Amino acid sequence: MALVSPVFLDTTVLLAGLIDVGPASIPAQKIMTAVAGGRLRNPQTAWHCCLELYAVSTRLPEEFRLAPDDARRLIQEEVLARFHVEQLPADTRRAFLTWAARDRVAGGRIYDAHIAETARQAGARAVVTDNRRHFSALTAHGIRLMNAEELVAEGRL
């Protein structure tokens, strides 16, 4: 099967791909290496994912934790410099909130719903995440959900 494009990477993939937390990081690291080498073209993520990456990487267990300035530098050099960083268009934000309330999206689920809608609005054809369940609504829009291992296998990265 041909690699779909554009591919949208969730925070879970960015984090594991940029911070080695053991064997579970290997597929995500291969993806980030493919991005850096230009083999994975036009990767997308959300500004919200950049903020989550900063938040999580600066509060990881001490052996993995980044200092705030190191997290900033990593995001600037590895994400902002190589990805199309998307945001929910301003003219769709009210409709998104209306949808979220109507569908009874509550608590922290709003964050993944926001990232999912950003991916949809950005024209992503696939979302790569370790939280597939949180993004399942995208399949109704023809957007594939994959984990990092699946993308690596499909793209031969």
Image: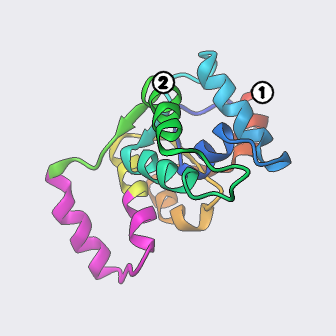
Nearest the viewer among 154 and 34 is 34
The mark closer to the camera, 2 or 1, is 2
The residue wearing badge 1 is 156
Query: Where are the magenta residues, as a range?
Result: 91-114
Name which of mark 2 and mark 1 comes first in the sequence.
2
The answer, for residue 93, to whether it is visible in the render is yes
Q: Which structural element holds mark 2? A: loop
Nearest the viewer among 36 and 1 is 36
Which residue is depicted at the point 70% across and 49% down?
Answer: 64
Which kind of residue does numbered mark 2 sit on?
Answer: Arg
Q: Which structural element holds mark 1? A: loop
Q: Position of residue 14 (x, y in %)?
A: 59, 42
Location of the N terminus by quadrant is top right
Q: Is residue 19 left or right of residue 72?
A: right
Farthest residue to the right: give it: 23
Q: Main secondary structure of the magenta part?
A: helix
Q: Position of residue 8 (x, y in %)?
A: 50, 41
The residue wearing badge 2 is 82
